[in-house]
Image (spheres, rainbow, N blue to C red):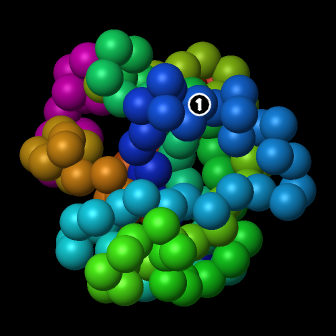
Amino acid sequence: MAYWLFKTEPSAWSWQQQKKRGAKGEAWSGVRNHQAANNMKAMVQGDLGFFYHSVEEKRIVGIVEVSGLYRLDPTDETGKFGLVEVKAVGDLPKPVTLATIKAEPKLAEMVLVKNSRLSVQPVTPAEWQIISAMGGLK
């Protein structure tokens, strides 16, 4: 299993909206960055991801699961980019802010710290464990 981080502006797509989709999940569409698209191409069903609210909040608020593999994104008129399906797994009991992540020396090499603009990014197993603990998960 691999781990990921999915960034979204809460005004465009929020954690509350994601949770309302239930087991059906939602297409993670609108990605127009080749590196982020390649990350989605590498995903398999069952991979887990942090759901990150960007812009004002800058914090991880929940966990999602990849429920549908990479396919073409019908919102992309160029036909170059795709999407995956994700479904909510659960809330992070204690949201973890970007400032908290940056303050943890063990997370200094995390993509979120080094390239915070990338919308879909990998998370190492060690980073996943550290942030999960920070967020109150066991």
- In this figure, which residue is indicated by the disc labeled 1? 14
Q: Where, by quadrant of the figure, is residue 23 drawn?
A: bottom right
Q: Position of residue 22 (x, y in %)?
A: 87, 48
Q: Residue furthest right?
A: 23
- Please name whichever residue, 49 or 14, is drawn nearer the observer in this view of the structure: 14
How would you classify the magenta stretch by its main secondary structure?
helix
Position above or below: 40 against 21: below
Relative depth, front residue between 101 and 133: 101
In the rendered view of the protein, which quadrant contains the N terminus? bottom right
Residue plotted at (21% across, 27% down): 102
Asked whether residue 133 is drawn in magenta, I would say no
* Extreme residue in the left direction: 114
Please give the name of the residue rendered at 33% of the width and 14% of the height, measured from the top-left corner. 56
Which quarter shows the C terminus? top right
Secondary structure beneath disc 1? loop
Asked if residue 108 is among those painted magenta in the image, a careful observer would answer: yes
Q: Where residue 131 sits in the image (x, y, percent)?
A: 46, 37
- Segment colored magenta: 99-110
